[in-house]
Image (tube, rainbow, N blue to C red):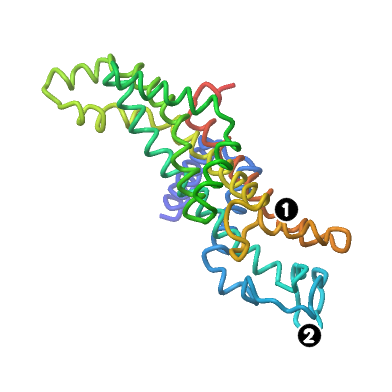
């Protein structure tokens, strides 16, 4: 009986090892998942981990170094900035906004681009011309100049940044979705569904879309990191999210005034931004290799 249990356990362990090997999990990928999970947990439960409010000013504790005790006798993990605000607390609340911006903008841009790409590839005709020429026009415009121009008119704010990055991020999704639809719409399983009387919407939703999600997911994984960096850049130049909202880009911008006196107000938020973007990009690389068997075999 014990031998049977041992054999069954060994069989399950072997299956688990094969599953992990099939997922192509490497140490950098595992570390990226762990780091991203840690950032998400800290961001979601920021009030539990933050010792101070993100905008709580204590001028007598300004520019307290990391891992030291301030004038009030409190321990400062990452020190304080030029106004005495706790950098650790601001980094945590800034992570919240970075994740919110990255995920929500990809959701908006990916959904819009997928719908437009399906329309262009399956319907063809004038709709395809309008959608693809619109994509060509937007590609011809420098992205950052476009963001600055729109924000200069509408004004800065979290909602404005999310909507602008979301509604201008549809192009890559639409182009890839259109190409996938053109490759799939004459496949035998699609022709069979149409011959059986399936409506156009059913063919698109049930048969074409599930077979084209792999490249869309890859694009989305990289766009999360890109939009986080773009939002930080907009905050850095002062036209994105207002200064009273803690963002990593805003922290970097404010730290310019005290860089000669202290390195940590600029360095630590920059490191946090780098680690988040790096982990998301490494996971995006892993997703691309996992979903593309040609890359996995090379």
To which quarter of the image does residue 251 belong? bottom right
Rendered view: 96 above or below 105? below
Q: Circle 2 is placed at which residue position?
A: 73
Above or below — where is 68 with respect to 41? below
Residue for point 51% across, 49% down: 161
The image quarter in which residue 222 lies: top right
- Residue at which label 1 appears: 271
Q: Position of residue 139 (x, y in %)?
A: 52, 26
- Mark carried by residue 219: none
- Dot 2: within a 10 Å radius of its alpha carbon, few (fewer than 14), some, or many (20 or more) residues? few
Quarter placement of the N terminus = bottom left
Residue situated in front as seen by the camera: 7 or 186 = 186
Left or right, 201 with respect to 216, comes to left
Which mark is first along the chain, 2 or 1? Answer: 2
- Element type where label 1 sits in the image: helix
Identify the residue shown where x is 52% and y is 21%: 294
Rounded to the nearest whole Å, what is the CA distance between mark 1 and mark 2? 27 Å
| Image side of residue 190 versus residue 280, left or right | left
Q: Position of residue 135 (x, y in %)?
A: 45, 26
């Amino acid at each position: 009986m014990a031998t049977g249990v041992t054999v069954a356990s060994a069989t399950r362990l072997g299956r688990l090892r094969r599953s992990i090997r099939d997922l192509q999990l490497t140490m950098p990928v595992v570390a990226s998942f762990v780091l991203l999970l840690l950032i998400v947990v800290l961001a979601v439960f920021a009030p539990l981990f933050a010792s101070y409010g993100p905008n709580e000013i204590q001028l007598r504790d300004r520019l307290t170094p990391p891992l030291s005790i301030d004038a009030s006798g409190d321990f400062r993990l990452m020190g304080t900035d030029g106004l005495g605000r706790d950098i650790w607390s601001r980094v945590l609340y800034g992570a919240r906004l970075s994740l919110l911006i990255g995920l929500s903008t990809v959701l908006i841009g990916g959904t819009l681009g997928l719908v437009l790409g399906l329309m262009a590839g399956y319907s063809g005709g004038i709709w395809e011309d309008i959608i693809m020429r619109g994509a060509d026009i937007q590609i011809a415009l420098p992205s950052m100049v476009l963001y600055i121009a729109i924000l200069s008119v509408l004004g800065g704010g979290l909602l404005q940044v999310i909507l602008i990055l979301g509604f201008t991020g549809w192009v890559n999704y639409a182009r890839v979705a259109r190409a996938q639809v053109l490759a799939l719409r004459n496949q035998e399983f699609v022709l069979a569904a149409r011959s059986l009387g399936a409506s156009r919407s059913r063919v698109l939703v049930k048969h074409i879309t599930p077979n084209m999600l792999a490249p869309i997911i890859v694009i989305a994984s990289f766009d999360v990191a890109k939009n986080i960096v773009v939002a930080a850049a907009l905050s850095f130049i002062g036209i994105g999210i207002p200064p009273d909202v803690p963002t990593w880009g805003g922290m970097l911008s404010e730290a310019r005034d005290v860089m000669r006196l202290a390195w940590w107000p600029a360095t630590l938020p920059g490191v946090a931004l780098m680690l988040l973007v790096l982990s998301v990009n490494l996971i995006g690389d892993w997703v691309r290799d996992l979903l593309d068997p040609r890359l996995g075999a090379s």
